[in-house]
Amino acid sequence: MGNLVAIVGRPNVGKSTFFNRLVGKRHAIVDEIAGVTRDRIYGKSDWNGVEFSVIDTGGWVENSDDIFEEEIRKQVLLAVDEADVITFLVDAQEGITDMDEAVADILRRTQKPVYLVANKVDNNNIRMQAAEFYSLGLGDPWCVSSINGSGTGDLLDEVIKHF
Ligand code: GDP
Ligand code: MG
C-alpha cells in the first residue's frame, strides 16, 4: 500500500475521530468495545487530489493495565514499520501523560516523518496549553480539532508533500 499515513497515540486522544475526519463518515467507527481487541482500521482519503491511505491503530485492549503499554508499543512499532508518514496524536486538553512519553520515545528513533498532533484544540485557550508538547522532542505540535476540523487542512498540506 503506497502513501500510507498511520495514526498512533494512547487511547482517547481522538485517533478514531481524526481518522473519521480524514476518511469520511462512510467508514466512521469511533466507539471502542471495552475489553475487545480490534484489528487496525484502514481507510482511503485524498487531499487536494493526492490520494493516500490511513491506518487507525486503535485496535488494542482498553483499560487493561497489564498489556496496555506493551500493546501500544506493538501498535506503534507496526505503524512505524508499515507507514510512510506517522501522525502522533496527543490530547491538548489532558496534557502530557507517561504513555505519551513512552510513545514519543519510540517515535524519536524513526527516520520516517513524524507529525506531533495536539488534538482537541477546539479554541485558542487550549492552543496555549498545547505548547507544552514541545518537550516530547518531536518539534512544535500541529494544533487540530478533529471535532470541528480546525487545523487539519494545514496539517494535511504538509503530510501530502511526502507523496
Ligand atoms: P481514540 O481512543 O484515540 O480513538 O479516541 P476517540 O476518537 O475514540 O475519541 C475519544 C474521545 O475524545 C471521544 O469522546 C471524542 O468525541 C473526543 N474527541 C475526539 N476529538 C476531539 C476534539 O477535537 N475535541 C474534543 N473536545 N473532543 C474530541
Ligand atoms: Mg479509537
Image (cartoon, grey):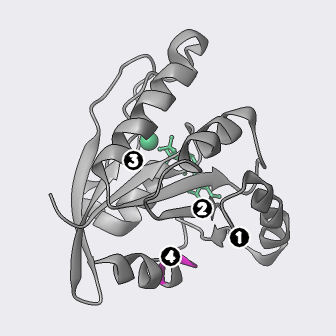
Name the residue furthest top: 66
Q: Which residues are magenta?
A: 149-153
Q: Amino acid at mark 4?
A: Thr
- Badge 3 crowding class, 10 Å Cα cut-off, few under 14, some 14 to 19, many 20 or more, is many
What whole-number distance in Å separates the C-alpha atoms at marks 2 and 3?
14 Å
Q: Amino acid at mark 3?
A: Val
Name the residue furthest left: 1
Q: Is residue 51 above or below residue 1?
A: below
- Badge 1 crowding class, 10 Å Cα cut-off, few under 14, some 14 to 19, many 20 or more, is some
Q: Amino acid at mark 1?
A: Asp
What whole-number distance in Å separates the C-alpha atoms at marks 1 and 4?
15 Å
Residue position for label 1: 140
What whole-number distance in Å separates the C-alpha atoms at marks 2 and 1?
7 Å
Q: Which is in the foreground here, disc 2 or disc 4? A: 2
Do the numbered discs 2 and 4 sit on residues whose CB atoms are within 8 Å?
no
Residue position for label 3: 80
What whole-number distance in Å separates the C-alpha atoms at marks 1 and 3?
20 Å
Q: Which is in the foreground here, disc 1 or disc 4? A: 1
Residue 14 in percent (x, y) is at 53, 51
What whole-number distance in Å separates the C-alpha atoms at marks 2 and 4?
12 Å
Residue 89 in percent (x, y) is at 57, 54
Q: Upstream in the sequence, badge 2 or badge 1? A: 2
Do the numbered discs 1 and 4 sit on residues whose CB atoms are within 8 Å?
no
Residue position for label 4: 152
User: Residue 34 lies in what quarter of the image?
Assistant: top left
Q: Is residue 82 above or below residue 5?
A: above
Do the numbered discs 4 and 3 sit on residues whose CB atoms are within 8 Å?
no
Q: Which mark is residue 109?
A: none
